[in-house]
Image (spheres, helix red, strand yellow):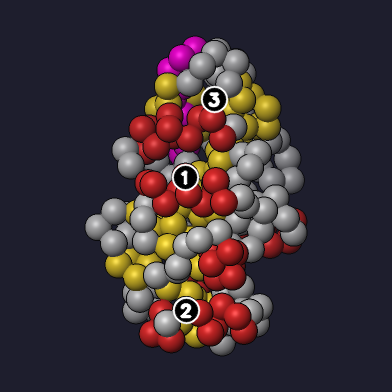
Amino acid sequence: MAIPVMKSASGVTVLGSGNATPALLSQALTQAKPLVAADGAAQNALDWGHMPDAVIGDFDSLDNKARALIPSERFYHFPEQDSTDFEKCLTRIDAPYVLGVGFMGARVDHELAVLSAMVRFADRQIVLLGTHDICVHLSSPLTLTLPVGCRVSLFPMAPVTGRSTGLKWPIEGIDFAPDGRVGTSNEASDTQVHIEMDGAGMLLFLPPEALDALFAGLGI
């Protein structure tokens, strides 16, 4: 088990090198103040006016400029190649939840690796913030207050079943699988949406404007 290098009584924001904006990072930091940069994302953090509290990764994309500007004691180098930089961050953060910024919308293979990690680390509360979507793994029952018509997309990363109320197309009785039935582009038919899965594997995607509702539903 990895030894945590970042501990927080509340949440931690992790910045990746995918699509992100200064506004998106600032939004995350209002909710989860400590900032961990995954490898080369340290330079993005600096460019947007934020000094990372820690930089974690194999450092294959870390800029020399960032190395010079960030105090050396904030660097945590893990050269092994059996895990991604996102996983290196997750396994070395001790916090109730993690907000991930810059992990969606760029290289598809990198994004898929992050989504896979969210399922494998189902015991961790992880929320991804993107410019077009926010994402969470449904590891426990979730009730959300949403406007009628709000997009509620479900994508299984493993075979899984569940049940719902408040969705236009209820999910009970459906055998979901990544190579079979998926649940993209469902929508809220009521202001109260409840989703409960029978096991790990289901990812929930919502529009960014539903972030406050998601935080409220998760209790963070």
Asked whether the viewer can see residue 142, the reply is no
Return the residue at label 3. Answer: 172
The Cα–Cα distance between marks 1 and 3, rounded to whole angstroms, is 35 Å
Q: Position of residue 100 (x, y in %)?
A: 51, 54
Q: Is residue 35 above or below residue 208?
A: below
Percent position of residue 204, x then y: 55, 38
Between residue 49 and residue 1, name the one nearer to us: 49
**Which is the main secondary structure of the residues drawn in magenta?**
strand
Q: Are marks 2 and 3 in contact (CB under 8 Å)?
A: no
Local crowd at mark 2 within 10 Å, few (<14), some, or many (≥20)?
Answer: some
The answer to whether residue 207 shows anywhere in this view is yes
Task: Classify the position of the C terminus by image quarter.
Answer: top left
Q: Say which residue label 2 marks.
A: 70
Decide if residue 136 is on the left or right side of residue 9: right
Q: Secondary structure at mark 3?
A: loop
Please name the residue shown 62% across and 52% down the image.
20
Across and down, in percent, residue 217 comes to 38, 32
Residue that numbered label 1 is attached to = 27
